[in-house]
Image: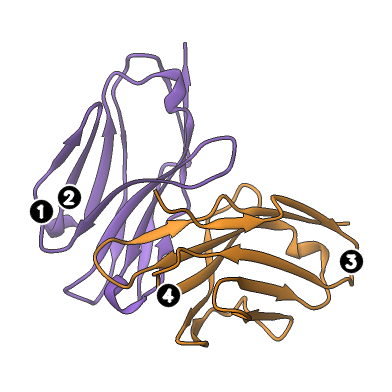
Amino acid sequence: AQKVTQAQTEISVVEKEDVTLDCVYETRDTTYYLFWYKQPPSGELVFLIRRNSFDEQNEISGRYSWNFQKSTSSFNFTITASQVVDSAVYFCALSESPNQGGKLIFGQGTELSVKP
Amino acid sequence: EPEVTQTPSHQVTQMGQEVILRCVPISNHLYFYWYRQILGQKVEFLVSFYNNEISEKSEIFDDQFSVERPDGSNFTLKIRSTKLEDSAMYFCASSEGNDYGYTFGSGTRLTVV
C-alpha cells in the first residue's frame, strides 16, 4: 500500500537559517511520482515540484532544493536562507500512476514557522 | 495559465442540509478529483472520476457523497445530509492523465453548524 510519512509535525527556525523537511514514502510500484506542495495560511495548495521514480537527480530552484534517494525511499526538501514568507504547511505526496489518473496520497504535513 | 475554479469559496450550512460544491476543471483534462482537508490535518483523497464514472473512491466517500459532471464543464460534489464532521476544506483537482500532474482549485471551506 502507498504511504507518505512526514515525521516532523512542526519546525521553527529563524530567518536566514537553512531548513530541511523530511519525507519518507512506501510503495510497491516501480513507477511512481513524488510531489511537494506548499499550503500558506490562505489555504490553497501551491505546487512546488514533481519528480518521477526514474529520475534521482537532485533539483535546485532558487532557494529550494530537493534530494530524492530511492535507496532510503526519501524525498527531502531543503529551503536555504529561509524567509518569513516561507512560513506555511508543506505536504509531500505520492502518486503511483498519475498517467492513468491515479490519486495523490499526502503526508501529514510539516508546519514551518520562520521567525524574523 | 489554466486554472481549476471552485465555488463558493466558503459555505456555511446547517446540519442535515444538502450541499453542492462546484468545480470547473481545466477544459482538456480527463481526470477529476475531490479531496478533503479537515482543519489542521492532512489532505485526504475522496474520489476520482473519469469518462463519466467514478474510477476510485476512498472509505470516506460513503453513500452521503455523490459526484456528477452534469454538463461537460462542471464537476460537483454533493453531500446529502451534512454532519458536523463534514466541516472541512474541499479541494477539486484535475489532470490530463500524463506526466504533468495535477492542478488544484483554491478550495471550498465548508462549515456545518
Contact between labelled residues 2 and 4, with CB atoms less than 8 Å apart: no
The residue that mark 1 highlights is: A56
Is residue A112 shown above or below A91?
above
Q: Give coordinates of residue A47: x percent, y percent.
A: 38, 47
**Foreground: disc 4 or disc 3:** 4
Callout 3 amino acid: Met
Task: Give the label on residue B15, or none.
Answer: 3
Q: Are marks 3 and 2 in contact (CB under 8 Å)?
A: no
Q: Are marks 3 and 2 on the same chain?
A: no
- Residue to which mark 2 is pinned: A68
Subunit bearing disc 4:
B
The subunit letter for the residue under badge 3 reads: B
Cα–Cα span, label 1 and label 4: 27 Å
Can you tell which quarter of the image residue B24 is in? bottom right
Q: Which of marks 4 and 2 is in front?
A: 4
Task: Judge whether A3 appears above or below A48 on screen.
Answer: below
Asked if badges 1 and 4 are on one and the same chain, I answer: no
Q: Disc 4 on helix, strand or loop? A: strand
User: Among the chains, which one is orange?
Assistant: B
Q: How many marks?
A: 4
User: What amino acid does circle 1 point to?
Assistant: Glu
Query: Can you say whether B104 is above or below B78 in the image?
Result: above
Question: What residue is pinned by disc 4?
Answer: B31
Inter-mark Cα distance, 2 to 1 = 6 Å
Colouring rule applied to residues: by chain
